[in-house]
Amino acid sequence: QCMAKNEPLNIQSVIQLDRLKGYLYIEAYNSAHLKQAIEGIYGLRFGLYKQKMVPIEEMTDVFRVIKNVAQIMPNSWVRFKRGLYRDDLAHVQSFDPIKSVATVKFLPRIDYSKLGDSNSKSKEKQYRFRPIAAIFDRDKAQNVGADVIAEGGYLVCKGRRFKRGFLIKRIHVSSLVTEGITPTLNELEIFNMTLEASDVGYTVTSLADHMLAVGDIVQVIEGELMNLLGLVISIDAETVLVQPNHTELKDPIRFGFKELIKYFKVGDHVKIIRGQNRGESGLVVRVENNQVIILSDVSIKEIKAFSRDIQLCTEKSISYDNLGKFTIHDFVQVDNQTIGVVVGIDGESISVLDQYEKILKT
């Protein structure tokens, strides 16, 4: 209409954004020019009586161009691309698609020896070595002089927020790997273990006191007696009494829970007492840090478990099919010309290794 009347509009631009439904942005020098532009347009009639000036600090957000970035869903998994946490797993808490920023939860890497030094550089990239990823230990932080305060359900230390031992941080999506992420069993158990703890000030101690039992073989991992082996003979609320396996140490010694881990060696027959493979037994074939690799008695496959989740045992697991007729290592006849041994059972399905070294599913 204005073109037909040869009356140009006194506005600079009109912007409508799909991500902001119900809003129309008009760039004009004053409200009179704005009203002139929308007069006679039925869908904008209410704008003649009510307009709102966009605050200067929000104007750049209106013109922000959103690139095609991966849409990250809450409760999904991501990994870091670079820096101190490169390849570390993180759990997505929330995602801002406009700013392309995700709030994630992950295991912190903290050098406690430098945490209490007010003169040390605080930037994570200043670390000369990569600290071990572990649950935040409030006691260690306070012992080196770092202030730890409770604030809104979080523990705050040196400007970093922790919840149940995990570091909570906002990360731009460009710094994250968002596709094809498959957490390992080790990683999943760490995250699930901590989610079960209700105390915001969670430390390893709060769970460790339920993971040792009288009769367990343990190894000292902290202090002057590091690597000492011994037998647990009693447990109270705060300490474990251990009989050392050492020629020069005859008397029992008390240790804190955090100073001990269960000890297993190759060839031990063990049983998994908690976790995804609870109830299975097998032989220890490797020990890697705090993780034990077990050759299952049932499936003859390797299973990974934390040392805290297994114990020594003498009995073996036995698996039957749904009808209770067959179990692992039974010799069976498949047909008139085929015989074999049962090597796997999954509900109603049975895997048989025949005389030709082929696996048959029946």
Image: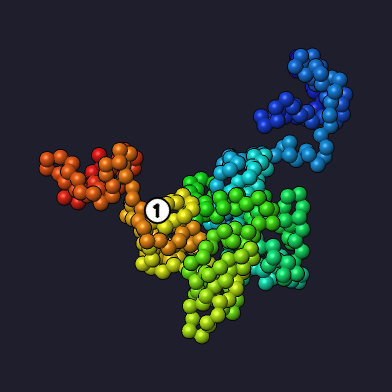
Up the image or down, 84 lies above or below 25; here it is below
The residue sitting at the bottom extreme is: 248
Is residue 264 rendered to the left or right of residue 156?
left
Is residue 129 rendered to the left or right of residue 335?
right
Counting from the top left corner in percent of width and height, residue 358 is at 21, 48
Q: Quadrant of the N terminus?
A: top right
Q: Quadrant of the C terminus?
A: top left
Amino acid beneath label 1: Glu
In terms of secondary structure, where does tag 1 sit?
A: loop
Is residue 51 rendered to the left or right of residue 213?
right
Determine if residue 120 is in view. Answer: no
Residue found 76% across the figure and 49% down from its top: 152
Dot 1 surroundings within 10 Å: few (below 14), some, or many (20 or more)? many
Counting from the top left corner in percent of width and height, residue 340 is at 19, 48
Up the image or down, 3 lies above or below 241; here it is above
Counting from the top left corner in percent of width and height, residue 232 is at 52, 69
